[in-house]
Image (tube, rainbow, N blue to C red):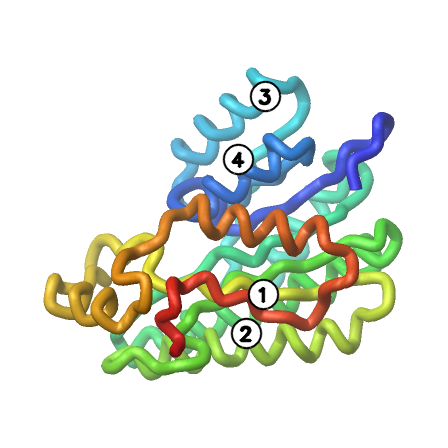
Amino acid sequence: MVTPTAPPVALITGAAQRIGAVLANQLHQSGFRVVVHYHHSEAAATELVAAFNKLRANSAVALSADLCSPSDISALLEATVAQWGHLDLIVNNASIFSKQDSDWEQMWRCNVQAPYQLSHAAFPYLDATQGNIINITDVHAHTPLSGYAAYCQTKAALAMQTLALAQEFAPNVRVNAIAPGAIMWPEGGNQLNSTIQEKIITKTLLKRHGTPENIAQALMYLVNNTYVTGQSLRVDGGRYL
C-alpha cells in the first residue's frame, strides 16, 4: 500500500491513548500518514502527533469529533480526506465500556452506529484506493461478560457489522475485525475489581494478559494480507475456548 509518491493514510478513532495510540504508532512506523482522532484527550493527541511529525514531517494530524454526533462524523471524514486527498484505512477503535444499562444508548451510538456511519461515508474514498476497514470488537462479542450485557451486545453488533459490510463493500474494500481479550484493564469508573480480573486470567488458556503490541501485530496482518476479508481475528490468549 505504500508508494513513493503517496503514502497511505489511516484514520484511527480513539487514538490518543491506550491501545489506539499503540495502533497509530505501529501504522506510522509502517509508513502511513495517520489521523489521530480524539474526543476529550486533546493534550495526549497533540503530544502524539507532535512526536510523529518530529520523526517524519507532515505525517500526522489530530482531529476532534464526538462520534455520537452524525454531523461530527461527517466533518471528521471531510477533514481527513482534505488533509492528504485520499484515504486507505479506517480503524474503528473508539469505544465506550460501561456496566450501566443507562449508558446503553450512548454505547450503541459510539460502538455500533459511529463505525457504521463512518465506514459508509468513507466507502467511496476506500473504494478508490482499494483500502480496508478494521473494527476493534471484543472477545465478549462472542462470549458474554457477566454484568455487562449492554456492552457485549454492542460489540456483537459490531462483529456482525463487519461481516455485513465485508459482503457489501467487496470486491475493492476489505472489512475485518480484531477481537481482543484481556489486553488492558478498563480505567476510571469502569475498573474491574481484582476478583474479576483473576477470573478472566484463569479462564485464559495462556494464563496471562496480552499487550497492546499484540493487537498492533494483528492489525498489520490484516492490513497487509490482501486476500482476507470478513474475518474476526481473536487475540485473546485462548480466552474464547
User: Residue 96 occupies which quadrant of the picture?
Assistant: bottom left
Mark 3–mark 1 Cα distance, whole angstroms, equals 28 Å
Mark 2–mark 3 Cα distance, whole angstroms, equals 32 Å
- Of tags 1 and 2, the one toward the viewer is 1
Residue marked by disc 1: 177
Q: Position of residue 216 (x, y in %)?
A: 52, 47
Q: Nearer the viewer, residue 205 or 29?
A: 205
Residue at point 48%, 50% (across, down)? 14
In what quadrant of the picture does the C terminus appear? bottom left
Q: Are marks 1 and 2 in contact (CB under 8 Å)?
A: yes
Q: Is residue 92 left or right of residue 143?
A: right
Q: Amino acid at mark 3?
A: Asn
Residue marked by disc 2: 158
Q: Is residue 34 left or right of residue 204?
A: right
Query: Which mark sits nearer the N-terminus, 4 or 1?
Result: 4
Q: Are marks 2 and 4 in contact (CB under 8 Å)?
A: no
Residue at point 58%, 51% (across, down)? 219
Disc 2: CA contacts within 10 A as few (<14), some (14-19) or many (>=20): many
Q: Amino acid at mark 2?
A: Leu
Residue marked by disc 4: 25
Residue at point 86%, 27% (across, down)? 5
Mark 3–mark 4 Cα distance, whole angstroms, equals 12 Å
Q: Is residue 25 above or below residue 162?
A: above
Q: Is residue 116 above or below residue 46?
A: below
Q: Secondary structure at mark 1?
A: strand
Q: Amino acid at mark 1?
A: Ala
